Image (cartoon, rainbow, N blue to C red):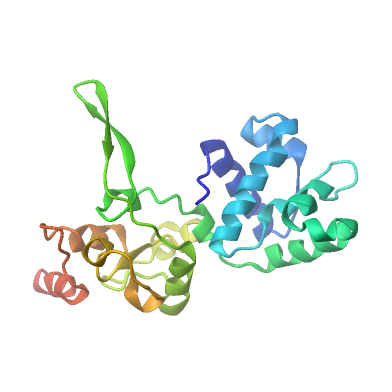
Amino acid sequence: MTVLTEKQKIMADALVKRANNKQTITFAELEKISGIDRRGIGGQVGKISKRCQELGLPLISVLVVSSEDRKTPIGFTKEFYPNNVDQNDIVCEEEKQKVFAQKDWSALLNWGTYDDLYPEEERLSFITVEGKKKTVKTSQYERDPKLRRACLEKYGTRCAICGFDAAATYGEDFKGKIHVHHIVPLNKTGERKITENDLIPVCPNCHMILHSKGGGSVYSIEEVKTMIENNK
């Protein structure tokens, strides 16, 4: 899985804003936004598109164009469509239309801040203990980001337990911000075939409660719903 740096995340956010407005962005503009020298931007935005590939999204780095002719450099096609380098302009225009047609970029912009808190996640973290940094390594379980997208396409982005909707509460900039919960934890069964039917969208609060049972077990969706009902 491609992990984006903080500056790549800044650029990804800028690219998504342009995509939503059906606009391109120049190397000079990205240089100003990210603080990365223009000569290094090509490789940085390439990483963002590699992340898009993993998520099943259009290749958003196609929006980065030269200020001289407003065209995507041939480097984009060489990296992602090497067999069509002689058709660079056509390839880039087709990819731009896919980017402009994409309505939901939440999978790219969800940096997984809260998801790192749960025991079945991959985690290599630094915690502070009386001023000293200590490295902690826990179990690693591989996840497929495309399954997350399939889950949200099937069930939507409201919490399946309490109905929380990030966009309704915090505004449209937070549309699609939701966790995806494995109904049966990965640490219980290990490697197995998983479909969107094994996942459910839940808000961070309900996700925390689901994983608060202890002993490596989780509460069921119905159990947490009953907790909420009983405490009204």
Please give left or right for residue 147 compared with residue 141 in the image. right
Q: Quadrant of the C terminus?
A: bottom left
Residue 21 position by quadrant: bottom right
Using residue 213 as the reference point, say whether residue 191 is left or right of it. right
The location of residue 122, given as percent across then percent down, is 34, 49
Q: Nearer the viewer, residue 14 or 184?
A: 184
Number of marks in picture: 0
* Residue appearing at x 51%, y 37% in the figure: 6
**Does the image show residue 232?**
no
Q: Residue furthest front?
A: 191
Residue 213 percent location from the top left of the image:
12, 61
26 shown above or below 224: above
Q: Position of residue 56 (x, y in %)?
A: 58, 65
* Residue at 74 percent of width and 54 percent of height: 62
Name the outermost residue toward the top. Answer: 131
Nearer to the camera, 19 or 154: 154
Left or right: 144 with respect to 96? left
Instruction: Give the answer, above or below, for where 49 lies relative to 191.
Output: above
Q: Quadrant of residue 105?
A: bottom right
Q: Is residue 149 visible?
A: yes
The front one of 83 and 97 is 83
- In the rendering, at what x and y percent does residue 157 appear? 41, 69
Q: Image point 42% across, 60% down: which residue? A: 177
